[in-house]
Image: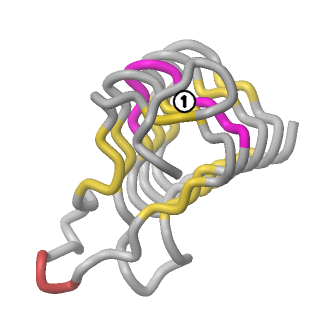
Amino acid sequence: MSGHFCSVGGGIHPSAYIGGNPESREWVPEDGTDGVELGEGVRVEAFVTVDAALKGFDGPTRIGARSWLFRHVHAGHNVQIGEDCEIATGSGIGGHVVIGDRVKVGLGAIFRPFVKVGDG
């Protein structure tokens, strides 16, 4: 996915920070990361941060196809967000959280690490 932002159909706002170092006491720079994987048509608004994944866990941090991260969302390391999700403004998603497909997360929601949310 390119860095070009499009308000309809996907894109990444230029102020979003995708693939930053994992915020984890377990991570050290020499470990590297497993990165971030964005599905087709993902929409990432202004001031969103998505951390790269710690190596050796469950692969890269993933944002599923056609999902939309509203302004000021933070997705921690090793997060898995399904397809067709909407994560509303100001939400915080801790490390290793799994969110199923077609989930709509309300304004300012907070997910503690290792939480799982099913589809729908």
Q: How is the image coloured?
A: secondary structure
> Is 70 a magenta residue?
yes
Q: Nearer the viewer, residue 56 or 52?
A: 52
Does residue 71 belong to the magenta stretch? yes
Q: Who's the residue at 29% across and 41% down the image?
A: 17
Nearer-the-camera pick, 37 or 11: 11
Q: Position of residue 37 (x, y in %)?
A: 53, 62
What is the chief secondary structure element of the magenta stretch?
loop
Quadrant location, the C terminus: top right
Q: Is residue 40 above or below residue 44?
A: below
Q: Which residues are magenta?
A: 66-74
From this view, report whether residue 28 is shown above or below residue 90.
Answer: below
Residue beneath the point at 60% across and 56% down: 80
- Relative to residue 62, is residue 10 depicted above or below? above
Name the amino acid, label 1.
Leu
Instruction: Tell me which corner region of the image, top left, top right, bottom left or bottom right, holds residue 62.
Output: bottom right
In the rendered view, tell whether residue 97 sits above or below residue 8: below
Residue at the right extreme, as displayed: 120
Q: Secondary structure at mark 1?
A: strand
Would residue 45 appear left or right of 31 to someone viewing this image?
A: right
Task: Give the residue drawn at x 59%, y 50%.
Answer: 63
Give the total of numbered labels. Answer: 1
Per the image, the residue denoted by label 1 is 69
Q: Position of residue 31 (x, y in %)?
A: 21, 84
The residue positioned 68% from the left and 50% from the top of the image is 40
Q: Position of residue 7 (x, y in %)?
A: 57, 18
